[in-house]
Image (spheres, rainbow, N blue to C red):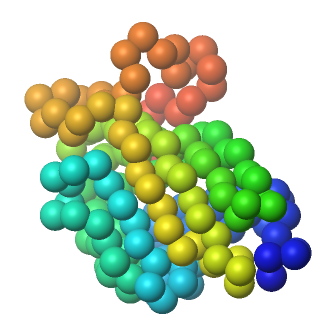
Amino acid sequence: MANELTKEYMERHIRSYFEACNSGDPIQIARFFEPEAVHYFPPGMYAGPFRGARTIADRWRHMVATVGSYWTVDRVLCDPPSRQAVIEWTHFKRKDGKILRGDEWYIFSDDGLISEIRAYYASPQDQSLDRLELGGFDYEKLGYPMEPPKE
């Protein structure tokens, strides 16, 4: 697959993965990953990295069920020769009324599946804030989503 990996494939794969996450269906989520994939987070978050496709899927299913998580892919850059991509995303925690923004660095396997994600957050998850995003960055002017979709 490495020779066939294209920007279009990589972006479609990432966007489809986010659609699966929003569905809360762990079987659909897991199919985007290598079985031993790892999803990393900043220190102290989620009790460490999620290890394994099924663990990643189950954790996102739980977030959809408990906090009404809904994610958007806001920007995408792909580099097929290195099998890497980076995205900006928005995470709406609809039941909590919170917005979290960040970036993720993706590594694709030779088979075109995600083998690693490294998540970087715009700010620490300060529970006293309703919006967790870069200070001074004009999200609205640049076309970022400002409200979650209606349930």
86 on left or right of 122: right
* Farthest residue, direction front: 82
Residue 22 vs 130, above or below: the answer is below
Quadrant in which residue 7 is drawn: bottom right
Quadrant in which residue 50 is drawn: bottom left
8 on left or right of 72: right
Q: Is residue 66 visible?
A: no
Q: Residue at x 71, y 45 (%)?
A: 77
* Farthest residue, direction right: 4
Residue 25 image offset from top left, x and y in percent = 44, 79
Which quarter of the rendered picture does the N terminus lie within?
bottom right
* Farthest residue, direction left: 128
Residue 112 vs 136, above or below: the answer is below
Residue 121 image offset from top left, x and y in percent = 36, 40
Residue 28 image offset from top left, x and y in percent = 52, 82
Q: Residue at x 23, y 29 (%)?
A: 130
Q: Is residue 29 visible?
A: yes
Foreground pick, 80 / 141: 80
Residue 14 vs 112, above or below: the answer is above
All told, the count of numbered labels is: 0
Residue 101 image offset from top left, x and y in percent = 41, 37
54 on left or right of 20: left
